[in-house]
Amino acid sequence: MLGIAQTLAWASSYYLPAVLAGGIGRDVGSSSATVFGAFSVALLVAAAVGPVAGRLIDRLGGRPVLVASNLVFAAGLVALSQSHQTVHVFVAWAVMGLAMGSGLYEAAFASVVRLHGQDARRAITGITLFAGFASTVGWPLSAYLESAVGWRGACLTWAALHLVIGLPLNALLPSASRSEAYPAAAGALREAGAGLSAAQQRRAAYLMAFVFAATWFTSTAMAAHLPALLQAAGASLAAAVGIAALVGPAQVGGRLIEFAFLKHAHPLLAARLATLAHPLGVLLLAIFGTSAAAVFAVLHSLGNGILTIAIGTLPLLIFGAEGYGQRQGMLMVPARIVQAGAPFLFGVAVERWGTDALWISALLGVASSAALVAMSGAGRWWARGNRG
C-alpha cells in the first residue's frame, strides 16, 4: 500500500515540473525557469516541515500524517490548476512543499519503522521498489493528460487521484499504539545507539547528513541535466534521450540487487559500494567517451537506487528506531536544501565546463564513500549489523 501511495506522491510532485513547467509558464506569463524556482521553494518548505512531520509520526504513527499529506497534495494541485499569476504558482508550490515534507520517502520510512522497528529494512526496500517507477508512470501520464485536458486538467486529475487512491491506501495502514512505541524487538531497538557517546552520535549524524546531501545533490543534478551531459559527451539527441530512459529501470534494478543479494550485507557496505558507482561511471565516460555513455547512466542509476534505501536504513542501524521520524527529518534538511539549488548550480557548471562538470559529482561520490568509511570505524556498528 505504501509503495503504490508513494508512486503517486512522487509522480504528482517531484516529477511534475519536468513535463508541465513549460505550459504553466506560458499561461501565467513567466518562464519555465521561474516555475522550477517555485519548485525549489517547495523543496525548502519540505526541508522545514520534515522534522515536524517525523516527530508526529513518532508520536501518532504514520497513518494520520500520510492521510493528511494526501489532502494537502490535493489542495496544492488544485491551487496550482487555478494559478493565473506567477505569485499563485509560488504559493501553490509552497503548499505542495508542506505535503512533500510529510508525504514522501522520509515519512513512509518513518511509518514502517514506527510499526516494525529494527525489522523495517525489508519494508523500506519494498516501498522503493514500487516508487522507483514513479517517473516511468508519472512523466507519460502527465504528458498524456496535458495533451488531452491541458496542464490545469492534469493537475486536477492528479489531485483527484490523491483523494480516490492515495488517501484510502494510507488510511488502510495499521495504526500504531501510542502506549507501546516500537513493539517489534523493543530491546534490540534501544541497543542500536546505546554504546555510543553523545559526541559519537553527533559525529555520526554529521557524517550521515553530509552523505545524504552530497548524494541527493548528484541525483537531482543528473535528473535535470543528464540528457544535456550525454549530448555534450558526443551522443545525438535521440541517443541521449534513449540512454536517459534507462535511469528509472536501472534504479529499480539497483533496489532489486539490494533486495536479492545485499539484504544480508551490512548497510554501510552496500552504501559505500553505491556511492562509488557514479564516480566509476564518470571515469569510464572520461576514458571511453560516448561509447560508455549508457554504462555511465546505468552505473549512476544503480548506485542511486541503492542509496535511496540507505537513506532509510542507515539511521535505523546507527541510532535505532526510537525517535526515528524526527531524526530522519533533521538528517534530510541539508539534502533538501542542496537539492533545491542543484539544478541551477550544476547547470552553471555544465555551461562553463561541459562534461568536465561531472568531476564535481564524482568527487562528491568519493567524499561520501570516505565519510561512510569513517562511520564504519566503530567496530561495534559493523559487528551488530552482521549479527542482525
Image (cartoon, rainbow, N blue to C red):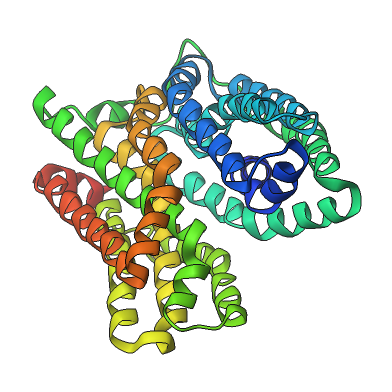
State whether residue 146 is above or below residue 294.
above
Q: Quadrant of residue 141?
A: bottom right
Q: Is residue 312 visible?
A: yes
The picture places residue 254, in percent across and down from the top left corner, at: 45, 65
Residue occupying the point 38% across, 63% down: 350
Residue 380: percent from left, percent from top: 12, 43
**Residue furthest to the front:** 29
Q: Give the residue drawn at x 57%, y 56%.
A: 132
- Report the number of numbered marks: 0
Whether residue 260 is visible: no
Residue nearer the viewer, 84 or 334: 84
140 up-or-down from 190: above or below: below
Left or right: 240 in relation to 310 = right
Q: Quadrant of residue 193?
A: top left
Residue furthest to the top in view is 179
Q: Specify whether 47 is left or right of 78.
A: left
Q: Quadrant of residue 363?
A: bottom left
The residue closer to the viewer here, 325 or 126, is 325
Q: Residue at x 81, y 44 (%)?
A: 154
Q: Quadrant of the N terminus?
A: top right
Residue 169: image location, x then y, percent:
72, 35
Residue displayed at 38% across by 44% down: 311
Judged left or right of residue 67, residue 363 is left
Is residue 177 positioned above or below 81 on the image? above
- From the top left corner, tell me how far across and down residue 383 is, in percent: 16, 48
